[in-house]
Amino acid sequence: MRSIGAGMVAAFVLVLLIALGSRGFHWFDAALIGYAVATIFATAAVTYKYTFWLARPPTGRYWRRSWQLFLSYANFRRYTVLIPAAISLRKRLSVGAACIAGSRTSASSGAWCSPV
């Protein structure tokens, strides 16, 4: 029963957001009614299934524990080092890929490629 209520609340919130975005349905295109209705029903259905799935004890336990681990201080410390390293590695790889493709300079950084 709680899952049905969550789905209805999600659908209602989406209708409010559509009304807000279209200024009280004043600027709502009539050709989009079918898409809007389908999106509202899909939102309600996905919310219903997700909350129903989370209501099962093992699933809820795994979900809570995974958020605890993701938001833990140890992971925060580790990810503050890993994410910038991954970004710089990606930039270096994209420069290398541009050089391999035959360009004289890398488009992303403007760095000159070394002759091979």
Image: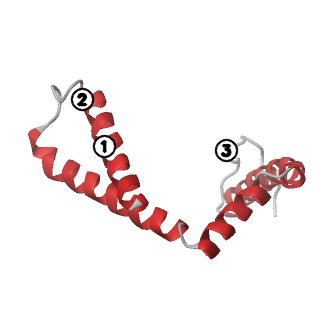
Residue 114 place in picture, x, y as percent: 83, 54
Image-based side of 79 in relation to 5, left or right: right
Read off the residue under disc 3: 108
> Disc 2 vs disc 1: which is toward the camera?
1
Q: Amino acid at mark 2?
A: Ser
Total residue callouts: 3
Q: Is residue 30 left or right of residue 52?
A: left
Instruction: Please name the residue shown 42% across and 59% down the image.
Output: 2
**In percent of the image, x 25 and y 32: which residue is there?**
19
- Height in image: 107 above or below 75? above
| Image vertical order of residue 59 relative to residue 80, above or below | below
- Callout 3: few (<14), some (14-19), or many (20+) C-alpha neighbours within 10 Å? few
- Residue flagged by tag 1: what amino acid is it? Phe
Residue at image x 24%, y 24%? 23
Q: What residue is pinned by disc 2?
A: 22
Foreground residue, 41 or 4?
4
> In the rendered image, which residue does mark 1 sit on?
12
* Quarter of the figure with residue 24: top left
From the viewer's perspective, is the residue at label 3 or at label 1 nearer? 1
Give the side of residue 24 with respect to residue 96, left or right: left
The spot of residue 21 in percent (x, y) is: 30, 30
